[in-house]
Image (cartoon, coloured by chain):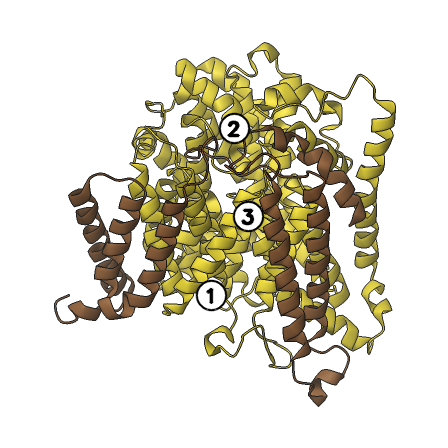
Amino acid sequence: MENLSLLMDGFANALTLQNLLFALIGVLLGTAVGVLPGIGPAMTVALLLPLTYALDVTSALIMFAGIYYGGMYGGSTTSILLNTPGESSSVVTALEGNKMAKAGRGAQALATAAIGSFVAGTLATGGLVFVAPFIVSIAISLGAPSYFAMMVFAFVAVSTVLGSSRIRGLASLFIGLTIGLVGMDVTTGQPRLTFGQPLLSGGIDVVVIAVALFAVGEALWIAAHLRNGKPATIPVGVPWMAKDDWKRSWKPWLRGTVIGFPFGAIPAGGAEIPTFLSYVTEKKLSKHPEQFGHGAIEGVAGPEAANNASAAGTLVPLLTLGLPTTATAAVMIAAFNQYGIPPGPLLFETEPLLVWTLIASLFIGNTLLLAINLPLAPLWAKLLRIPRPYLYGGILFFATLGAYAAGMQTFNIVILLLIGALGYMARRFGFPVLPIIVGAILGPEMERQLRRSLQISSGDPAALVSEPVPVVIYTVLAVFLLVPPLVKSIRRRRAGTRTGTGGTDGTGGGGAGPTIPAPDAPDSSRVPTRVAQTHPEHHPSAFHPDARA
Amino acid sequence: MSSSTAGTPVTGAPATGTPTVSRVPAVLRGRSELGVAALLAVLATIVAWDAAHIKQLSINVGVMGPQVVPNIIAVGLGLCAIALTVDVLRGGAADAEDGEDIDLSQGAHWPTVFGLAGVILAYALTMEFLGYVIASALLFYGSSLLLGSKRYLWALVIGALLAVGTFYGFVLGLGIPLPAGLLTGIL
């Protein structure tokens, strides 16, 4: 059990008084910012990133772990207490959670979300401890063609699985790749898309891209359509659960964890599919299916657990392969790069203590989160009433600060505004934002792997399929891209009465639930293609492009 | 790509039924997305043009020069532009983003959006001269008023407090210097 002893070293390194303080600050700030309406976990992490600039790597990563989990917990508080959820991964939580809050059971909804997040986060981080070294041991022997293939897979996954329109996802991806091109070519030092501007030769800072897309784009978009009048928030007391609530919650927590972790761990990304699957599963298995749609606690417990488990799962490809598959993970890559420690299999070899300290701090952050946030929930609920002009004015205030601090250049603020306008456009026309940032981050890396593959073979493209991993991945992709349209056309021909699909207006998952093939839910090997093809139809607005996740 | 275009109108169909953000006549509604397709086409042209102007050095000639990937991306952008045009003309659309504070039943309020963009641009241009504190306080003040705050004094006070607090937090707390500008010597 070598990983356990390494993990213990990590704990020893993380559990100093100073580091605990940083974890505490991270959890508090992460939750406080994450609770604010309109701010999802990715924006939370991006906005708070400058705070870690001055810290040493270990403290920064520990604070980061706190911010990460805090931001996610804050997001679920928002979706329970405010009607419309702010981020795609909390959409499902809001379905039952907000109904519970309206029925005066907000305290129980918050409690099952918090405790479920803790249980799932802890179990899934435990999963990370065991899975990560295993993947590293494989990944270390993989060559450039395999990495190239995995990146292609991640690209296809983030741009076509999520969101409702493949063409828009791909367009987003290519825009992101274009942003990633800017700067000096790493291999030959040739400037590309710099237009003679020396400030562009180093490329556009990922922090600037992230803050622009998530904070500025969002603030501008909301500013254009700001809802008049006071938002209807629901005051809430200290979260607690009665015996019956515990009885109804613990199984959904565990099932949510089991569903969430693998979905996070495969580089296909996103918490939307696992949270939705968890919801459908709980609805199917519940003894009180009639309560679904009116505030069933299982419908909060399961998806919340799935959400957190998949968030911990996304750390597997992030840490072991350097592949970000969610917006938050993309911002975390930026944080790692800030310290010159790009994630990947080598990180486990060169910086084992650092990696295991980070993993240990995930456990610590998760525990602190539960201990602090249960009593503080009423306070967080008050944050929801912050006047909107100050809220969005404040977002712009901190977004410009983050962009400026990323290079101490006011030029960055101009770039911020330009990419922010792009973020606005994406929201207006329903283009997913995630492929833009993933393309910008992974694009240069993918080019490097592609060149390396071809260099070894002196230009023979057959090198790209010279290892077993790429062959498998390309086959999966082919199936994945070709089967759903085929199934769809077959179904369309067959179905006369059964197609009540495209017409639903997406007001809630409750209505969409029954038409999903739920018995297949736990069978994760078959689900991705099914879901990719079914859920956008059933659920046009709720499973919206991953804009704020 | 053809398969994805064919699939989209089905997916996007409900979106056209929901109230979209537009005051344009019904015939043109939803077609403003053609502007995005045009943007993609322009991007494709710029990337291709830039790639064509990369110097041909002996180091590039080897296996794969720095112009190969930009060319692939330019082609990708171009194909996306075409596919998106076809999709939009067929009536395809995706839902605009909804959220807690978003009311999609009204059209976009452009004065606010362009006002905010102007404030940010002015901030970028004047920040090093005015100094972080003054510029940021004004940024907060300006954006709050644009976003509809009616408490003219309060917004200024909050902006000033935020700016001073952040300045000292960064300089003293994190050791990151921010420009003092006009207030050099006072702060």
- Which residue carries the number 2 mark? A93
> Could you tell me residue B7's position as x and y percent?
76, 39
In this view, A206 is above or below B10: below
* The label number, if any, that marks residue B106 in the structure image: none
Dot 1 falls on a residue whose secondary structure is: helix
Q: Residues within 10 Å of mark 3 (few under 14, many from 20)?
A: many
Occupied quadrant, residue A146: bottom right
Q: Nearer the viewer, residue B134 or A264?
A: B134
- Locate residue A337, reporting x and y percent: 51, 65
- Three-letter code, disc 2: Thr
Q: Nearer the viewer, mark 3 or mark 1?
A: 3
The chain that hosts pointer 1 is A
| Disc 1 target residue | A338
Q: Earlier in the sequence, mark 1 or mark 2?
A: 2
Tell me if residue A1 can be seen. no
Vertical placement of A385 versus A33: above or below? above
Mark 1: give few (<14), some (14-19) or many (20+) Cα within 10 Å.
some
Q: Amino acid at mark 1?
A: Gln
In depth, the one of B97 and B93 nearer the eye is B93
- Indicate the colour of chain A: yellow
Parent chain of label 2: A
Which secondary structure, mark 3? helix
Give the SS element for disc 2: helix
What's the CA distance linking mark 3 and mark 2? Answer: 25 Å
Figure chain in brown: B
Residue under circle 3? A426
Q: Is residue A203 visible?
A: yes
